[in-house]
Image (cartoon, rainbow, N blue to C red):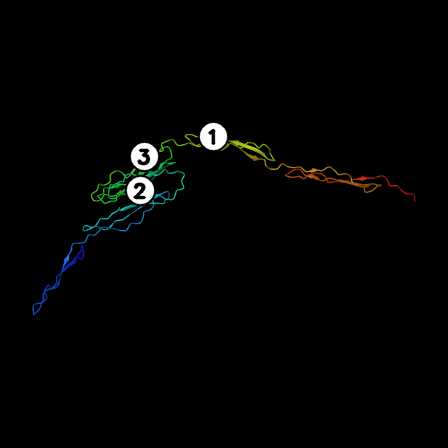
């Protein structure tokens, strides 16, 4: 047959064994005969539709997961091959390392697949210690994707959310999603989608607290640079691992930093100058200068910087005339 399904054609032929001669009759009919064959419908193999766009990554860094789905575009018919592979697929994303103050443990072994057929998933985790307790990082991968009747399957529980309080008793939640809905008469999922527990029930650390500073004491000097101080007391001592008080109970600072007044000071008087006359009453002078100028409100020098006096007051000799 020319086709294995969907309607083909087959033929058979015959040959003239004895040709007509001496006025005998020619052979009647055609040398080739045709008939339809394999008219049964052809098998139609299952075909998947296109994958959907990847979902947002479950985390911004440090390795998360994202998923996409697809549905059957053409179901298998007439004995065709069913679709293979899962309707839901996962991949890692945002694998760059987070800037964090904790370190992850090595990845654990993959858990047992959540389904024996029909597309399940398995999870592995790693742990780290943070202020909020134990943080868990999960990764998923598909498994057992051969087709079969499917019961509803929960995804593994997510990591516990951070505790609502770091101490003194708080609450934290974890949740889970439906990983595979019931199909082909499978059982519906049972149980809650979220759970809570108490956390961080230990007493909160109480940090040390200082009382306000007391008043400043008197300065040790009124000018030229002195020092004054004040003190404070511990108001609340540290408890339950709280931080000790930082700093000192005594604090000092400079004071009286304004310069002290400086009074003006004269130098000693210089020697008297030569008398302006050798006789008949002349004049001689002597001077002084400011050794220290008055500053910062000090007293100015009093008196002049020059003095005069008479000298050689004896009468001059007079010649006879």
The CA span between labels 3 and 1 is 38 Å
Q: Nearer the viewer, residue 22 or 166?
A: 22
Q: Residue furthest bottom?
A: 23
Q: State whether residue 196 appears in this view.
A: yes
Instruction: Give the residue number, with chain letter if any, for mark 3.
Output: 197
The CA span between labels 1 and 2 is 54 Å
Closest to the camera, between mark 1 and mark 2, is 2
Determine contact: label 3, label 2, CB under 8 Å: no
Identify the secondary structure beneath mark 2.
strand
Q: Nearer the viewer, residue 207 or 213?
A: 207
Identify the secondary structure beneath mark 3.
strand
Closest to the camera, between mark 3 and mark 1, is 3
Q: Is residue 5 left or right of residue 212?
A: left
Q: State whether residue 164 appears in this view.
A: no
Instruction: Give the residue number, with chain letter if any, for mark 1.
Output: 234
The residue at 29%/46% (across/down) is: 89
């Amino acid at each position: 047959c020319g086709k294995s399904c969907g309607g083909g054609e087959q033929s058979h032929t015959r040959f003239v064994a004895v040709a007509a001669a001496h006025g005998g009759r020619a052979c009647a009919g055609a040398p080739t005969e045709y008939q339809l064959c394999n008219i049964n419908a052809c098998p139609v193999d299952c075909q998947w539709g296109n994958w959907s766009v990847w979902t947002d990554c479950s985390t911004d860094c440090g390795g998360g997961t994202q998923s996409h789905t697809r549905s059957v575009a053409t179901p298998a018919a007439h004995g065709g091959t069913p679709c293979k592979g899962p309707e839901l697929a996962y991949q890692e994303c945002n694998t760059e390392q987070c800037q964090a103050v904790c370190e992850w443990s090595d990845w654990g072994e993959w858990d047992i697949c959540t389904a024996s057929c029909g597309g399940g998933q398995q999870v592995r985790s790693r742990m780290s210690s943070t202020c909020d307790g134990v943080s868990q990082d999960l990764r998923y991968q598909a498994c057992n994707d051969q087709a079969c009747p499917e019961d509803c399957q929960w995804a593994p529980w997510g990591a516990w959310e951070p505790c609502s309080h770091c101490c003194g008793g708080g609450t934290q939640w974890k949740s889970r999603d439906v990983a595979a809905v019931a199909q082909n008469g499978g059982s519906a999922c049972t149980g809650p989608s979220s759970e809570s527990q108490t956390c961080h029930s230990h007493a909160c650390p109480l940090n040390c607290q200082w009382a306000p500073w007391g008043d400043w004491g008197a300065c040790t000097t009124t000018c030229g640079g002195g020092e004054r101080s004040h003190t404070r007391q511990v108001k609340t001592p540290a408890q339950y691992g709280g931080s000790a008080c930082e700093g000192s109970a005594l604090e000092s600072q400079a004071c009286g930093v304004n310069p002290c007044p400086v009074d003006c000071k004269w130098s000693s008087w210089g020697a008297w100058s030569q008398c302006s006359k050798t006789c008949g009453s002349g004049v001689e002078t002597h001077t002084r200068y400011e050794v220290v100028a008055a500053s910062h409100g000090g007293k100015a020098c009093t008196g002049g910087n020059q003095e005069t006096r008479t000298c050689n007051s004896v009468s001059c000799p007079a010649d006879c005339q």
